[in-house]
Amino acid sequence: MSNLIFRKDGTAQGVAKQRLIESIAKPNKRVIYDPYAKYFVIGASIIKLLGHKISVWLGDKIVQGMHEHLICRTRFIDDLIEESTSAGIEQYVILGAGYDSRAHRLKLPLKLKIFEVDQPEVQGIKLSKLPKNISNKENIIYVGIDFNYQSLEEQLLKAGFDKSKSTIYTLEGVSQYIPKESLDLTLKELAKLNSNSNSKIFISYVNKLLLQDSKACFGIGYLKPEKAIKFITNGAAKVGEPWISFYSAEEIQKLLSQNGFNLIENKTLADLNSKYFAPVGRMIPEEHIFELEHFVIADSINFS
């Protein structure tokens, strides 16, 4: 498997920036809150000075709806993790953890074992940026890995992963950057670890319609969808993280099924707009909807 799965510092910074922007909104207007995002963002003080509304407005001048899309994805996973752990999930594995802060900012059970998987150098940068007195750090196990030489299964087991315990895995904002064979191999390794039928996985993927009909990846009336796609894909390539893999819903379902997982949810911002943004008075108009990326939840299939 390629190390590209965990080489996403540029993207990680960009996502952290959106979490910071959302976090400086008024408490009754924000969808998520991340007090740690500021540690990973260059120019955080300028963003705070500009404020939430202006920062979102400036972003919309480049790609309309991108901020809301990323915040929607963040909240969707937040809810999944909190609901799953409240229901008894015992282990949480974050693949390509980057600057993920859920282990610190979410209300998680004290007994939950959290494995953050990434390259050692990325983990070193993250730990150097986080405050020393950060909450819940004693529950986190950092699993450093070089996929050119090491097995995910072996490294997790060596770190104390228990195959008999129910687990939730997250692979957020990664699948578009890695070859399809790498995603398949990752799922196969998770299947080996996954002997408990209560386990779950989250995966996001980019709709392959991007290559065929760009308008289908946005809300009706979205202005210049081709320009938005070009900006996003060119920007990713410039920071050394090009988008190379795209999927249909059928492909993702088949890929999960072949590796022991049953797809139970497949959502986009359009599906979650009324759930997350309407309650805070920020319902997104149809012509600003960004549906390029899908959010998938699957649970493990018990073959016994």
Image (spheres, rainbow, N blue to C red):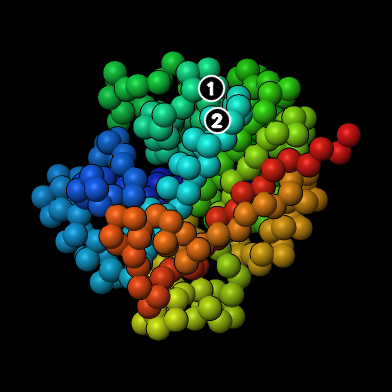
Instruction: Report which quarter residue 124 is drawn in.
Output: top left
Q: Give the residue number, with chain letter if any, for mark 2.
A: 85
Q: Which amino acid does label 2 sit on?
A: Thr
Please state the horizontal and vertical placement of residue 215, each as a whole percent of the image. Answer: 49, 81
Q: Which residue lies furthest to the front in this view?
A: 279
Q: Which of marks 1 and 2 is in front?
A: 2
Relative side of 109 to 21, left or right = right
**Residue 127 x %, y %:** 36, 27
Left/right of residue 227 with respect to residue 244 in the rendered view: left
Residue 178's x, y, as percent? 59, 54
Q: In this view, does 295 lie to the left or right of 55?
A: right
Residue lying at 19% horizontally and 59% vertically, measured from the top left = 53
Closer to us: 153 or 135: 135
Q: Residue at x 34, y 45 (%)?
A: 32
Q: Tell me the quadrant of the picture where the C terminus can be found.
A: top right
Q: Which residue lies furthest to the right in this view?
A: 304
The residue shown at (59%, 46%) is 202
Labelled pair 1, 2 in contact (Cβ < 8 Å) = yes
Instruction: Indicate the secondary structure of the residue bearing disc 1.
Output: loop
Q: Does residue 93 appear in this view?
A: no
Q: Nearer the viewer, residue 220 or 230?
A: 220
Relative height, residue 48 to residue 236 (above, below) = above
Q: How far apart are marks 1 and 2 (CA)?
A: 8 Å
Residue where numbered disc 1 is placed: 112
